[in-house]
Amino acid sequence: MPIALPRFFAEYQATIEDTLRSLVPDDGTVVSKAMTYTLDAPSKRVRPVLALLAAELCGGTAARAMTAAAVMELVHTSSLILDDLPSMDDAALRRGRPANHVAFGEAIAILAAFGLLNHAYGALARAYEPPLAARLAGLVTDAVGSRGLIGGQAIDLLATEKDIDFDLLERIHREKTGALFNASAVAGAITAGADGTALAALSAFAKNLGLAFQIVDDVLDVEGDPAETGKAVRQDARKTTFVSFSGVDGAHQLAAELCQAADSALTPFGRAADRLRALSAFVASRRA
Amino acid sequence: MVETDPRATDDRQRVRAVEDDRQRERVDELRQRLRALGYLDAGVDRFVLGPAHSTRRPLIFTLLSAIRVGIMAALLLGPAATLGVAARVPGLITGPRDAAVVALYLGVAFGVAMAVATLTAALAVVAAARISPAAVTRRASMLPRSAGATVGVACLVYFTFWWRTVLADVGWSAPLWTTSALAIAAAISLLLGHAVAVVASAIVISVSGGAAPRQASWRSTLIAGAVAFGAAALLLTWSGTTSASAVPPAPLTVIPSGWRVKVIAIDGFDPRVFAELDAEQRVPALASAFSGAVADLAAGADWSPDPARIWTTVATGQPATVHGVRRLETRRVPGVGGTVSTTDAAGAWAALRNVTDLLRFTRPAIVSGSERRAKTFWEIGAEAGLRTAVVNWWVTWPATASNGIVLSDRATLRLEYGGDLDAEMAPASVYEKLRGQWPALKARAERSARLVEPDPSASPLAGLGRRSAELDALQLELQTAVTASATDLSVVYLPGLDIVQHTLLGEQASGVAASRMSERLAFIKGYYITLDRLLASYAALDPHDDEVVMVITQPGRIGDVATGRLAARGRWTSSSREVSGSQLDVAPTLLYALGLPVATDLAGRPLTGIFAREFTSAYPLRSVASYGAPQRASAARASKPLDQEMIDRLRSLGYVR
């Protein structure tokens, strides 16, 4: 039974949308339109919400963490545009709309992706004092780099239509999805001046949650409805996914267990972390 | 309506059940893989990092996390170390309660050590982070692993050497035990190393803001475990475990010579004083005992004025480092029934001992036979089937029934106080017998002492002489009572001379005027004569035809320059022959005389020179590899131990302060 988005989630989403619009305004250029095309498309904004919740949990404010949170969405959107390219996953549908390269052409889509990344680093530099900005930029760099989104995507591409083992699949998920989940949680906490223990606990939460999110994604690719998911299903048929190893039921079960483990990682925070727990409950039950 | 074939339905259900089982197995396997990759239950990490979320200061959270690692080490190592200590320190753990308390103490000790090690490693990371944050960021994954590896390797080396020390007698001769121990050591080392790495990585994260380092895969964990195990095994082999005593003791065969052996042990005996008195013909009984073969027992490196230590050396033929009895006075830790031996070192160790006493963390106790790690000559004889009886030897409590008749150094206390037996003597039937005879035995001993020391009020020192004579007479009475004509080995320890000598020349003698000192010396000489008469009255030194009487003397607590003596008198001893030996040679010599093979792992060798050539020709020296460790048979213990009474008595006699 899917769990509805918690009310606080919707409030965060609205603020994040505003921030994204202010960070990437539509200046009338084609690249700008291409950027806002995918950025404004319907999205749950899980990563920025995760960053905001982490910041508040560590004693910070959503206002201070907002730019860092929005940056995570910029990076994520950038990666989606690139992932959908014909040279990569060749997906036609994204967030319920034609994919960026379908709407604007491949070249513009590539530029839009880089434009979003460019905005992300710039936003950090402008919003925060230099030491924190540098720290956050380093965090984003790690999440995007060869051990993050880029590395995961590269392995994913090379593994397409090949049998891969479970460890390699986990690495792909960890780098393509987990890295940005982790960066989101840690970035939010850093803006609140969190200590190492809190960061480690949030990192453990994000790690488990990130994999659960991806497993649910794999399941939705098998049994999801394009109208609900907003993207083409059976798109991963050429790939080894979690469902290939565990079956649909097993994948559901493991996703739920990972969400429980994510919740357990928050034990040191007590009830204060209930909003993050609500987030994990939503991830485990999502249909889109 | 469509009819369904019931058999087809059953088949479908069976197929579905099989598929469900397979599915469950697949999910179980994936769950394990995910755990190995650091997902799902990361209990250790959460435990280590759990409590410090409220602090934002790296130093404080490092401290709190280090304490958690210490708690983990305490829980893991306390019980493991207790097993080792139980094997290595016999006498300390007397039951489950002792084991629990010792585990608690060791757990605290290991926990503190581990917490300090973790704190040190983590502080090094904190320091590095403060000096060069950029470098820490660059080495975000390397630093925690290095810290964890350092602590893990240190733990592994320590555990391996600890195992080597704890079971030095076993080593690879017990491959299952050793393999298990090394596997546990490797696992604990990996776990603690991982815990330290977790703490260090949390610090690095707090400094650099980077992601948590990647968890090791199950493959790399397995490889690390195998490497750790291999390294520990190599280290154990390289450091060289032993040993001869690992060889199981062979069953002993006695080739009877027809001799019965009577042993009279006299403490506080100065051969030069005896020589003076002998020249004046004032100690005829002792002179006759020393008229046969005599061996000088040189005071070797193991000599000590401590009576428990030296007389255990005499009884076992092993130095204190082997037999384990280092001091009469030991220490008891609160909550633990057993005792732990203390070193006889002075300086810092003595100061530490005094401090722990002062803080009531330890309190004085008297060494017991449970702490002895080598067999005495009477135990070896009894195990070989000889009939043995021993009276009042040091460190014989608790007495066990498997060692022949034993009247321990607490036997007279039990007879005096009455009540149920607490292993003061064995077998229990002896207590029943002596209990009835006790008033008569005591009266006879007093009478004998009165004959040799007629008037205790004659001088201020005469009372001391009377008490000492009564004590010696009581031991001789008890020896007579428990020794039958069929007893192969009868042993008695006489403390009177040492008590007199120590009382008059010991610490209380400082500041005594020369005239008083002269009086004291004269009194001591007088006690030699008293003892001589006492021995004569019991005919203790007169061997029967089938008997050899051996007198063993030691210089006692004062005699730092005098050597001991072993005098043997009987039909097959050599006459008027003097040989040289040491205290370590007494036990092998007695065992040889009893027709037993002598173990090659004994530190001493039989003094065959004191025996007649006919005897040594007829009974050539036989040997065995080892007698093995003492059997810890259960003793008859139904009453409250006379611990405090024993301490009070030894204190009144000047043995303990």
Image (tube, rainbow, N blue to C red):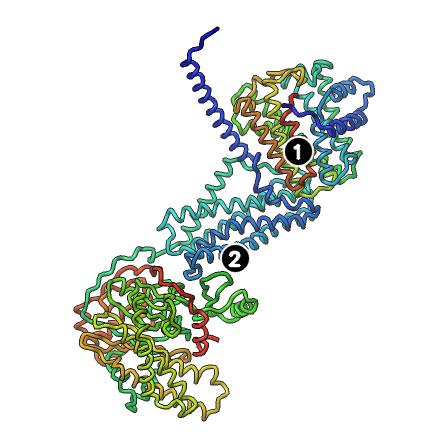
Q: Which mark is residue B105?
A: 2
Same chain for mark 2 and mark 1? The answer is no
Which residue is at 64% across, 43% downward?
B202
Q: What residue type is labelled 2?
A: Tyr
Residue A137 seen in this snapshot: no
| Badge 1: residue crowd in 10 Å (few <14, some 14–19, many ≥20) | some
Where does residue A120 sit, x and y in percent of width and height?
75, 29
Q: Which residue is drawn at 39% across and 80% down?
A: B498
Residue B400 screen position, x and y as percent: 33, 64
Instruction: Classify residue B169 by image quadrant.
Output: bottom left
Label 2 and label 1: CA atoms lie apart by: 41 Å
Regarding residue A133, the answer to whether it shows in the image is yes
Residue placed furthest toward the right = A27
Above or below, comparing residue B206 to residue B342 in the picture: above
According to the picture, the residue beneath numbered tag 1 turns out to be A277
To which chain does the residue with label 1 belong? A
Q: How many numbered marks, from 0 up?
A: 2
Pick whichever, B69 or B622, lies toward us: B69
Q: Is residue A91 left or right of residue A120?
A: left
Q: Quick one: which residue is furthest to the top in this view?
A: B1
- Identified by mark 1, the residue type is Arg
Q: Residue at x 28, y 70 (%)?
A: B389
Determine the residue positioned at 40% across, 50% down. B237
Secondary structure of the residue carrying tag 1 is: helix
Pick the residue in front: A63 or B361: B361
Tell me where residue B258 appears, x and y as whole percent: 18, 70
Res B605 → quadrant: bottom left
Contact, mark 2 vs mark 1 (Cβ under 8 Å): no
